[in-house]
Image: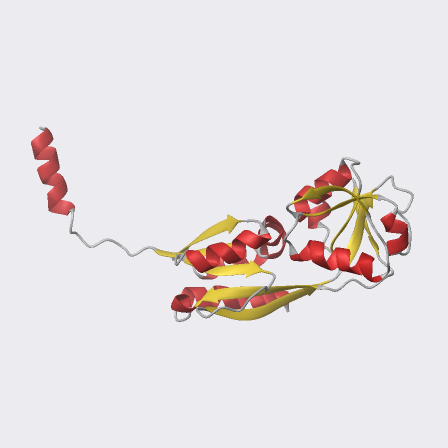
Amino acid sequence: MRFLDQAHELTTLFEPRPVTKEIQLIGSHYLLAYVLIDAVREFRELHSDYTLRLSTRAEAQVFALLLSEPHCAIGACTPTDFPRGLHYHPWRTVGWSLAIAQTHRWANAVAVSLAEIAAEPLIIFERGSAGRLHVLEAFFALGLAPTIRMEATSTPLILSMVSAGLGVSIVPTPASAAPLRGLDVVTVPISDPIRPIETGLYLRAEWEDDPGVQALLQLILAHAA
């Protein structure tokens, strides 16, 4: 019986099967959950014949994975290099806001200065991230030394820590209320300038002519506009 079962499997081994069209998109948890999700939903409605694989990584890991894994078609991250084999598309420019607990004394403030923030227990992004660099250079440009108490990998994790009362943080200004939903957190403008965070889309060259990848790319760019 076992021999007959294997013989039967051989009869169907070379039958034509529908080709699975798959696109892998990688980005930070924040970008995929709160920024890219609308474009992904629209793509699924228009191109149901494609399977989307969404992978979340830390900012530094997105770029490394995109360079090393040929099956990764599109990556969303802060541009740190422009190597051959990757085509870059500018995407979003985002400013900064102060994230504080709703019970904090600054919850209703019009704006808060970096000098005031420097005295607060500060939660910042981990070492090696572009967000950390932009925030710290703004402090040091004014001769200020912030009171760093904790570090974290992602914006959602930082917002959860702020909600738990572990400190304040300077985070990319949310495009909507979605990232703060369910958290006891409010955002307040910062009166001093901080260099905006630039985010781009990298497309591997071998995926450039794939119609599904191009459609997804254009949808993401259109949503940003």
Comparing 84 with 5, the one in front is: 84
The residue closer to the viewer here, 18 or 72, is 72
Q: Is 23 displayed left or right of 7 in the figure?
A: right
Give x and y (percent) for residue 11: 11, 45
Give the image's coloring scheme: secondary structure
**Quarter of the image where one finds residue 222:** bottom right
- Count of number-bearing discs: 0
- Location of residue 8 in the rendering, given as x and y in whole percent from the top left corner: 11, 39
Q: Can residue 183 be seen in this view?
A: no
**In the rendering, at what x and y percent does residue 37 appear?**
57, 54
Q: In this view, does 169 lie above or below 39?
A: above
Residue for point 50% across, 49% down: 55
In the figure, is residue 198 to the left or right of 44?
right
At x 81%, y 58%, the residue is: 140
Residue that sits furthest to the top in the current view: 1
Name the quadrant of the C terminus. bottom right
- Which residue sits at x=76%, y=39%? 163
Q: Is residue 122 left or right of residue 78?
A: right
Which sits in the foreground, 14 or 202? 202
Tell me what residue is drawn at x 86 percent, y 58 percent. 143
> Looking at the image, can residue 34 be seen?
yes
Position above or below: 103 against 135 = above
- Looking at the picture, how far across and down is residue 206, in whole percent? 38, 67
Task: Tell me: 185 left or right of 19.
Answer: right
**Quadrant where the N terminus is found in the figure:** top left
